[in-house]
Image (spheres, coloured by chain):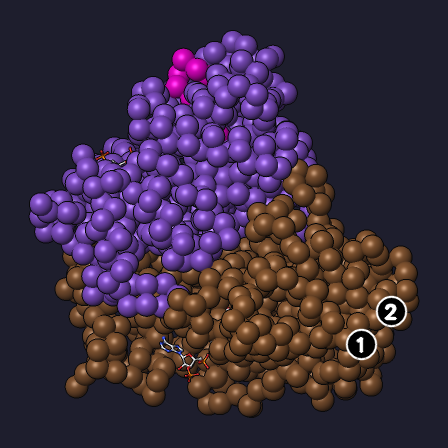
Chain colours: A brown, B purple
Amino acid sequence: MGHDFPKLTAEEAAELIPNGAMVGVSGFTPAGSPKAVPSALAKRARALHDAGEEFQIRLLSGASTGEACDDALAEAHAVSWRAPYLTSAPMRKLANTGRLDFIDMHLSHVAQMVAGGILGPMDVAIVEATEITREGRVYLTTAIGNSPTFLQKADRVIIELNSYHAPRIRELADVVVLPAPPNRAPILINDPLDRIGKQYAEVAPRKVVGVVHTHEPDGGRGFAPPDLVSRRIAKHVSRFLIDEIASGRIPPEFLPLQSGVGNVCNAVLAGLADSPGFPKFKVYTEVLQDAMLDLIADGSILGASTCSLTLTNEKLRFLYDHFDDFADRIVLRPQEISNSPEVARRLGIVAINTAIEVDVYGHVNSTHFYGTQIMNGLGGSGDFERNAYLSIFMCPSVAKGGRVSTIVPMCSHVDHSEHSVQVVATEHGLADLRGLAPHARARRIIDRCAHPAYRDYLRRYLESAPLGHLRHDLRRCFELHNNFLEGGVMLPD
Amino acid sequence: MGHDFPKLTAEEAAELIPNGAMVGVSGFTPAGSPKAVPSALAKRARALHDAGEEFQIRLLSGASTGEACDDALAEAHAVSWRAPYLTSAPMRKLANTGRLDFIDMHLSHVAQMVAGGILGPMDVAIVEATEITREGRVYLTTAIGNSPTFLQKADRVIIELNSYHAPRIRELADVVVLPAPPNRAPILINDPLDRIGKQYAEVAPRKVVGVVHTHEPDGGRGFAPPDLVSRRIAKHVSRFLIDEIASGRIPPEFLPLQSGVGNVCNAVLAGLADSPGFPKFKVYTEVLQDAMLDLIADGSILGASTCSLTLTNEKLRFLYDHFDDFADRIVLRPQEISNSPEVARRLGIVAINTAIEVDVYGHVNSTHFYGTQIMNGLGGSGDFERNAYLSIFMCPSVAKGGRVSTIVPMCSHVDHSEHSVQVVATEHGLADLRGLAPHARARRIIDRCAHPAYRDYLRRYLESAPLGHLRHDLRRCFELHNNFLEGGVMLPD
Ligand SMILES: CC(C)(COP(=O)(O)OP(=O)(O)OC[C@H]1O[C@@H](n2cnc3c(N)ncnc32)[C@H](O)[C@@H]1OP(=O)(O)O)[C@@H](O)C(=O)NCCC(=O)NCCS
Ligand SMILES: CC(C)(COP(=O)(O)OP(=O)(O)OC[C@H]1O[C@@H](n2cnc3c(N)ncnc32)[C@H](O)[C@@H]1OP(=O)(O)O)[C@@H](O)C(=O)NCCC(=O)NCCS
């Protein structure tokens, strides 16, 4: 499996990574992320720091990574610069306290920026695989992410050969690397399950400095069953999509669905699958979670294109045990393809993502609390939102036990503009904003989506704000946020 | 030319448009916009209003239209709903005073939303052409816009046959209508000048209720030669692009350029063409103005794909008089193709657009002053910004004689998020934001782009704001704007 490449321990491999190196890691979410070498690197960093030496790397990935990577490296203060996404609590803390440069990027941008040298040279890539051949074919595991590009661009490559994964996982992979512009041809995907590439990524064998053997699960976290609020949001969204089909605005066979991660998105998937008469459909998305695998298994979802299999250990085992049932119904793609604007627009995807807050005009904040604190980052939401046929954002109407309204006069950070957000849903209802001017959008969002306890405030804000195409009072538009920051509640009694 | 279709006066045609109708008009900017019927419709609306009757239409176009359309209809209060873009001062005034529902849309979205029935049925289309054949072939004039889709979807069609235009203009047209998803195939454009369609749009002849003969120029406005500030901005942008080529981050042959409208964009084009050794390049854009035609004529620009020829009367005459020189160097496309995310990303365009204001983190406001007053709308800037290989925004560092800084702590309206804005330039310098975390972006924008008179304020704002991934003080982030609104100057002495 590792052929002639030097066999290393994780510690030996970690020694090959110098202070200041730009390191690219495989995977997308914990799926396919390297495990042994990043942990060993974190230990090495601690030891060096204890000895008074500087040691920090620049870390680039597909999206978030697993605990053995982001958490371990953050806790060891071993990262100075991080892109394009994070979900790790310790990494987030560094980013929010000025101790880490975090760059929140569109996930579809990463490969072309690395390939173009825009982020500087990549010194080392650490890539998890089930096999590497003498000729440099690298068979990836549960996610493709940016690995094909990192393998091409990195000066030196460390492979983690993880025997936990079934070698057959390669049958799901469909690997291509887009050439640099202006030499790009069309991406010939007309259906989510179309295949256009190979089962493996490629690396120049001379660059492979070592192979580390591991046997570790991805350790993907499961989700609690959807709560009442998620189920209510899901009901509004499913009903809306059913009506759209009934009215002919969405074709009878439905359209490929992109669905964000988390409870609410899982509840929507389940809600659609449960709706009597709703057509079976395909998915074109970036993350496939347990709930979706179940729906593929029971036939409600006809198949999925994704960048990663973000499954719990049990569900991944189930996939491997019943591989024949899934082999031609799941395609694993690099993120420049799973999140491609070209493919998203052509297929006419319906994009469903979760918001942190939404303002009365339909701008969406996906990333920052109170204008300052990063949560996870944008992820693929911008890739999908802008190029979808229909773009839906959802969230509970309140957070923090009701002390925060997620419907606000003005978003404290805007990731998605009013021009790209077409539908907003909370547990109270759904607002279809298409074709509505700003004042009508505001009325609809307040009446249908805001929590009743905040509706009066929002209406009064608008009525008292200076008139314009949008009404806004720049002296008071963040009053709710400032109340919360000062007194812990947006609307004091 | 008009064949068997009923020949009508403009007044007779206007009579066919009922109160409340959704009307789609041809063109994109004044180019190709209908002239006689909208003017007659405005007169009819005035007469009806004088007689105490209600009369207002819903008006959909490619982008802005000419004076005979938007200005005339707005002055007659004959429009209740308008999309997707406007540059007309009277129309803007209605939108900003609550007397018009204006919907500011991504220009690439319009055709698919009309085709999908999302904006409601289209009652009447008014389309300018040089010819309509018995079979329903419609040869459009100086812009394609959404005419091919409007002709398909409208219940009734009025054709303005404008003999001002040279019939040979059809040789530039490349008309396709994309099918509805999920039945879309790749758009096979690999080079800005590739042709994939026909010279004409199509209409079912039975829907054509009349043909109106006209002889009217588009009346495109010219631009004064670039002023000093524009030339300085252009110098920074050209130098940056030259350096990008030198460093290999942009290929030696350059990439297709998308360029917004206006003085600064024209100055950049001229600046690139004037730079010794800068490669000759092609353009993939939505509007072609006088300056670009000159550069095609002198060979500095190898060719252009555009949605409209927004030329002065003299320059259009020049084009017609030298048509053979341009026939295979200009392609006129529908806006769902000129602004296609698929084509923009594949070609790897460099997008250069103008901002109203930019905040220290790189968010861009393209549309609204002070959070409330619409200027023109988003246009195609979002289509290009999100899918470009490199996205640049420019503006003078101050407006209103220095009383307004265009570099602000937080944008009062966000159309383009920090994730999509890669380079910012003013007359003071250029900030390349790629790969930089928020604090570094802020420093760079303030140091290089802000007007010196505002730099201290901006630095102090940041230093005193609560720490986070972004620093922001939601009590003070609009202090400059509020100063201006209250006292007419952002930084009182
Ligand atoms: C928006 C996003 C954070 C929501 O995640 P989620 O797990 O569904 O959200 P939850 O409702 O559980 O909220 C997560 C936390 O944010 C808090 N929160 C949510 N909205 C808030 C608001 N407006 N103000 C303050 N806190 C808020 C919640 O209270 C919760 O905090 P806690 O963990 O301390 O209880 C998440 O979807 C995300 O990061 N999206 C951006 C990336 C993306 O869209 N990717 C899509 C392609 S996969
Ligand atoms: C942004 C945009 C308005 C700039 O247009 P422009 O003609 O280059 O800009 P100017 O510098 O002449 O400014 C236009 C007006 O706005 C004012 N202005 C500009 N920035 C301002 C600011 N931050 N605050 C207040 N006023 C401002 C100017 O003072 C000027 O007003 P005046 O006419 O009363 O003197 C224009 O490019 C636009 O509408 N863009 C959005 C659409 C788009 O990007 N299309 C791209 C594809 S074609």
Q: Which residue is mark 1?
A: A213
Pick the front one: B66 or B193: B193
Q: Position of residue B107 (x, y in %)?
A: 46, 45
Q: Position of residue A167 (x, y in %)?
A: 85, 75
Magenta part of the protein: which range? Answer: B308-316
Q: Is residue A99 left or right of residue A133?
A: left
Residue at 49% x, 77% y: name it: A90
Q: Is residue A487 left or right of residue B34?
A: left
Of helix, strand and loop, which one carries label 2?
loop
Q: How many marks?
A: 2
Callout 1: chain: A
User: In which quadrant of this rendering is ligand 1 seen?
Assistant: bottom left
> Residue A2 — which label?
2
> What's under tag 1, amino acid-wise?
His
Disc 2 or 1, which lies upstream in sequence? 2
> What's under tag 2, amino acid-wise?
Gly
- Against B459, residue B327 (above or below) is above
Residue at 64% x, 77% y: name it: A39
